[in-house]
Amino acid sequence: MKVFRHRVRVRYAETDQMGVLHHSVYAVYFEEARVALMREMGLPYDDLERRGVLLPLTELKVRFLKPAYFEDVLDIDVEWSLKGIRLFLTYTVYRSGEKIAEGETVHVFTDRNLRPIRPPREIKGVFHRRM
Amino acid sequence: MKVFRHRVRVRYAETDQMGVLHHSVYAVYFEEARVALMREMGLPYDDLERRGVLLPLTELKVRFLKPAYFEDVLDIDVEWSLKGIRLFLTYTVYRSGEKIAEGETVHVFTDRNLRPIRPPREIKGVFHRRM
Amino acid sequence: MKVFRHRVRVRYAETDQMGVLHHSVYAVYFEEARVALMREMGLPYDDLERRGVLLPLTELKVRFLKPAYFEDVLDIDVEWSLKGIRLFLTYTVYRSGEKIAEGETVHVFTDRNLRPIRPPREIKGVFHRRM
Amino acid sequence: MKVFRHRVRVRYAETDQMGVLHHSVYAVYFEEARVALMREMGLPYDDLERRGVLLPLTELKVRFLKPAYFEDVLDIDVEWSLKGIRLFLTYTVYRSGEKIAEGETVHVFTDRNLRPIRPPREIKGVFHRRM
C-alpha cells in the first residue's frame, strides 16, 4: 500500500566510461518517479509550483547494490509519508524483479522564496491518501 | 581580436560508455565559456538576467573532429558579433593546441517572457567592444 | 516514409533557471529517439556496440523555434539516410502537433578504437529499409 | 588534516526552474573534488582505471542546508579514510565560508568487471598518507 511504480529506461548519455549508469542519475530518476506519482495522485508538481508551493530536497540517500546498464528497463517503487512540513519518500529500483538500488529523499514545503511553509490542506489530503 | 579563451576539464560524469566526452556536453562547455566571457567583459549574465534580459539560443551547431577524454584540459576560444537583436558566437575547442571541435550558437535578446527585445544600449556597447 | 516517432517527457532536472528545457538536452532526446529507432528496426544499438561497431557523431545541429517546458510531452520524428560510411539523421520536435525544434546529426561507423569502418552488410540492409 | 579543498562554479545548465543548483549535481561536484584530490595525491583516477582498478560507489548521501545559485563559487572540503576494501569520503560545501551542504560517498575497489578486489599496496599507501 502507498506504493507507486514508475518505469524508466537507461539512456546512453547517462552511462559513463565505467560502462554503467552514472551514480548521479539515480536522483534524476527518483525525481521523475516522484513527479509521475504526484501527477497520478491528481496533484501535478507543475500545478503545485504555479500555486507558489515548492518541494526542495533537504536530504538525498542512495545505496547502489548492482550496476545498471544502457537500455536497462528499471522499475522504481516509491513510498511516501508526510510528517508536519516534511515529506519523506523512499525508492526501490528493480531490474527484472531484482533489487539493484534503493534511496530516500526528504523534502520541505516552501514558498517561492524557499521559505518553509505548512503544506496547504488539499496537499495534506493527497499525501495522506493511499493509492 | 575579439577572441576570449576559457579552459575546462572533462569530468568523469560527462563521459559515456564509448569512453569519450558525451557530445551533448559541448553545448554546456560553450555556455560556460560564454558566461565567463560576459563576466570578463563586465556584463555578467546573472546581472543581465536580474535586469530582465535573457539570451536564449535559437541555434546550436557543433562539429566533432576528435574525441575528448576524461581529465582532458580543453581550451575554448570564443568569438562574437552582435547584429540587431541577434548575438552570434563561434567556439573553437583545442586540446594541447590541436583543434578537436568547433561550434556556433545564435542568441536573441528577450524579456523574461521570452519575447524578443532590442538589446539595451550598454549591452550593445559591451558586445561591440573588443577584448 | 522512413519516419519514426518517439515520445519523451521533459524532466524537472532538464529545466534551467530560465524556466525552460535546457538547450543541451535536445541532443540527449535525439539520441534517445535514435536508440529507440534502432531497437524498433531490429538493430539495437547496444548489440551493435557489443559487435564492436560504434556510431559517434561528427556533427550536431539544433534550431530552437519555441521553448519547451517541464512536463511537456514531446514527439520526435526521425528520418534517416545512409551514404557510404556516414549516417544522416534529421529530427523534428513537436508539442501537441506544433513544431518547436528541429535538428540533425551526422554519424560515422567506427570500430572500438573510433577508427572509421564500412558499415557491416546487415546494417546497411536495415538502414536502407523503410519502416 | 587529511582535508583537501576543491573549488567549483555553478553552471547555468546545472540550475533548474526553481532557480537553484539542481540537487543531482552535488554528486557530480563531489566526484570532481574526489578526482582532483587523487590527482593531487599523485594517484590520478584515470591512471588507476588504466591499471584496471575502478572505484564505483556503494553509497551516496547529501544534506542540503542552503540553496546554491548560478555563478556561485563553492569550496568543497574532502576528507577520506580507507578501511579494508572500502574508501569513505566526506564532503563539506561552503559558499563564502558558510556551509551550505555536506555529503558522503562510500566506494569499493573493483576490477574492470566490477568485482571487489583488495586495493593495490601503493594505493593503500596514498590513502593512508596525509596531505
Image: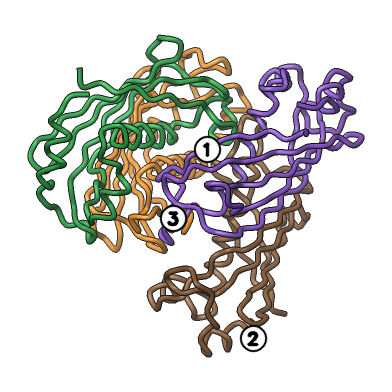
Chain colours: A orange, B purple, C brown, D green
Q: Give the alpha-carbon distance from disc 1 to disc 2, as whole Å.
A: 40 Å
| Element on which disc 3 rests | loop
Of badges 1 and 2, nearer the viewer stands: 1
Image-based side of B5 in relation to A27, left or right: right
Amino acid type shown at disc 1: Val
Residue annotated with mark 3: B16
Quadrant assignment for the N terminus of chain B: top right
Is tag 3's residue or tag 1's residue first in the polypeptide sequence?
A: 1
Give the camera-side residue of C105 and B4: B4
Give the camera-side residue of A86 and A10: A10
Q: Give the alpha-carbon distance from disc 3 to disc 2, as whole Å.
A: 28 Å
Image-based side of A19 in relation to A44, left or right: left
Residue annotated with mark 1: B8
Of all chains, the one bearing label 2 is C
Do callouts 3 and 2 mark residues in contact (Cβ within 8 Å)? no
Identify the image quadrant of residue C105: bottom right
Disc sitting over residue D126 in the figure = none
Q: Give the alpha-carbon distance from disc 3 to disc 1, as whole Å.
A: 18 Å
Image-based side of B94 in relation to A3, left or right: right
Task: Please provide percent x and percent y for residue D112.
Answer: 24, 59
Residue with the most extreme front position: B97
Residue sitting at 66 percent across and 61 percent down? Answer: C59
Identify the image quadrant of residue D58: top left
| Element on which disc 1 rests | strand
Residue annotated with mark 2: C128
Residue sitting at 63 percent across and 86 percent down? Answer: C129
Residue sitting at 78 percent across and 39 percent down? Answer: B107
